[in-house]
Image (cartoon, rainbow, N blue to C red):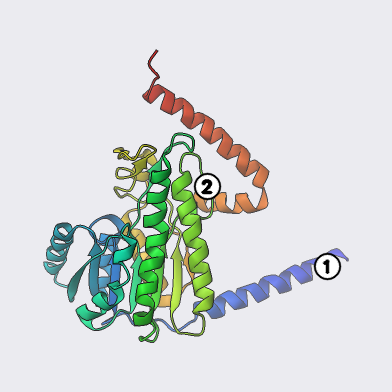
Amino acid sequence: MSPSTVLAWCGGTAGLIYLILFLLRRRKRVQLKGKVVLITGANSGLGKACAMVFNSAGCKVILAGRNLSKLQKVKEELQRLKSSGDLGILQVDLSDLESLGNKGQEAKAIFDAVDILVNNAGVSYRGSIEGTNMDVHQMVMNVNYFGQIALTKALLPVLKERPGSCIVAVSSVQGRISIPYRSAYAASKHAMQAFFDCLRAELWDTGVGVCVVNPGYIQTSLSTNALCGDGSKYGVTDTTTASGLPPETVAQQILKAVECGKPEIFPATMTQTLAITLRILAPSLFFWIMAHRAKKQSKVDARMHPKSD
């Protein structure tokens, strides 16, 4: 094959890809005003930011979470805003799988419908694989994976009643790659990514969209509330978290993704998205970098927690 033929083929392929992307981007925008949005983990962080931006866009928002008093405070804060719309509260505990089966009808009873489900709530984790109790692995998986499935399945019949409805799954860059000392968290997000990718395909002809959000670090209390290997709270705001994206920025990107019907977004830095590409194109190099990172982290842990003689 001559160089000119190769260039022509590459140019044609690039043009076709551009045309496809252009047509996909020209999908009719969803009008969010009046839509009912259920957001889990709405008491703080990204969930609270999502509640604010969707409510400001004219949506009726159902604030969902475990702590009713915190949800009430968020509701009162939103009600003080001039642009605030209708607000409701739904108690949801993702770790209690048996309690989630009726949440679809409970949610529908608040505003007689649910158009958008934002699966945002989750728990993070810090620890070595050898030093982590099995019940911690199970807890993280229950909240970040099984709880998400149970709640989504409970809401599906309600969502199918509404044309143009959407399910948002807040995963993570770590749903695509694993980094040292995050095994339980990364595994749960990998599972979450796979589930919602399957769900997107299975719901293709139903009118229910699925958008998976893969953010990098966000300025929230996720690391502070993370579980350690023994089940205790980590209690530290990592420097990566402190320097992450503001939750309001990510929330705006989620809102725009729902408006445009996007199947997936990556609110992350170029370095974080590059790591995903590197894992695919140069896995050996990626594994070497992760091994180096693990070694460096183990030295930091040794300085912070020296063993007694």
Residue 217, can we see it?
no
Secondary structure category for the residue under label 2? loop
Left or right of 294, for residue 89:
left
The residue drawn where x is 22% and y is 80% is: 109
Q: Which mark is residue 225?
A: none
Report which quarter residue 165 is drawn in.
Answer: bottom left
Disc 2: CA contacts within 10 A as few (<14), some (14-19) or many (>=20): many
User: Where residue 219 appears, x then y in whole percent?
Assistant: 32, 49
Q: Which residue is mark 1?
A: 4
Q: Amino acid at mark 1?
A: Ser
**Residue 265 as seen in the image, left or right of residue 154:** right
Q: Is residue 299 above or below residue 240?
A: above
Q: 26 or 218, which lies in front?
A: 218
Q: Is residue 115 visible?
A: yes
How far apart marks 2 and 1 lie (CA) works out to 41 Å
Q: Is residue 212 left or right of residue 36?
A: right
Q: Quadrant of the N terminus?
A: bottom right
Of callouts 2 and 1, the N-terminal one: 1
Q: Reply above or below: 127 against 202.
A: above
| Residue 120 located left or right of residue 92 | right
Q: Residue visible at 36% across and 60% down?
A: 250
Q: Position of residue 149 (x, y in %)?
A: 41, 66
Q: Amino acid at mark 2?
A: Ser
Q: Residue lying farthest right?
A: 1
Q: Which element type, helix, strand or loop, lies under badge 1?
A: helix
Q: Residue 191, position in %: x, y? A: 49, 58
- Compare residues 275 and 150 and report the one nearer the observer: 150
x 60%, y 54%: residue? 277
Q: Which residue is mark 2?
A: 178
